[in-house]
Image (cartoon, helix red, strand yellow):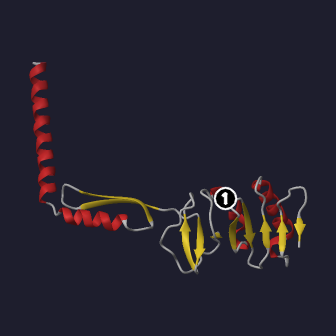
Amino acid sequence: MKKTILFWLMFILAIALAVYFAVRIIITINSPRADLDTLALQLSSRPDLRVSSVRQLPNGKYATRAEKHIAIAYWVHADAYYPLTADGTAVNTPIAVRPENSLVFRGKLPADITDIVRMAKPLSSNIDHIAWIENRRWNIITPTGMTVMLPEEDVTAAFDTLHGLQNKNQILSKNIKTLDLRDNSRILVK
């Protein structure tokens, strides 16, 4: 008795699966594949998308999935601001106006900018741009033209010092040409 019930349940399940796959095959064969390929090509060509995919549903409609790049800062080139991802990738969709309180980088960039962005973000309203100098250290340029020179090693300690100076003395607003933080035992001011 149990074997007979199990047999008929499996038989019904097999028929249902056969009908499902037959419908999927018929829809796929009868659907305009060119539309699906065109849509997939259009999505993959968008530079602001990191990953995209397209598939056709059994009802004939298309389902898309896309992940956008997440901009943590901007890279400026020829008065155009390109969004930067955490790994330093410049997204090839520039904008003409700098977003408010955003960090901007100029020149070459290292492979990973997450640490410098994390440390500089609280000071973003006082930073015009950040530059990667000689592939080894950072300079911060303020809107007043001050250059803050950061060390190659222990950038975190230099940022702690800079945050303290900014909170206590508003140092980034002063009329100073250069603030050299490369030697953590002494701060040089010009």
Q: Would residue 124 appear left or right of 15 to someone viewing this image?
A: right
Give the image quarter of residue 150: bottom right
> Relative to 5, is 168 above or below?
below
**Mark 1 closeness class: few <14, some 14–19, many ≥20 residues within 10 Å:** few
Q: Would residue 104 appear left or right of 16 to someone viewing this image?
A: right
Residue type at numbered disc 1:
Arg
Q: Who is closer to the viewer here, 151 or 14?
A: 151
* Residue 28 location (% of width, % of height): 16, 55
* Residue 128 location (% of width, % of height): 70, 75
* Residue 161 location (% of width, % of height): 83, 59
> Relative to 121, is 174 above or below?
below
Q: Who is closer to the viewer here, 136 or 148?
A: 136
State the quadrant of the N terminus.
top left
Name which residue lies at 76% across and 56% down: 152
> Relative to 169, is 17 above or below?
above
Name which residue lies at 10% across and 38% down: 15
Q: Which residue is mark 1?
A: 118
Count of numbered badges drawn on the protein: 1
Q: Would residue 156 appear left or right of 21 to someone viewing this image?
A: right
Name which residue lies at 18% across and 58% down: 59
| SS at circle 1 | helix
* Residue 175 location (% of width, % of height): 85, 79
Q: Who is closer to the viewer here, 163 or 117?
A: 117
State the quadrant of the C terminus.
bottom right
Give the image quarter of residue 142: bottom right
Give the image quarter of residue 67: bottom left
- Looking at the image, which residue sits at the far front? 134
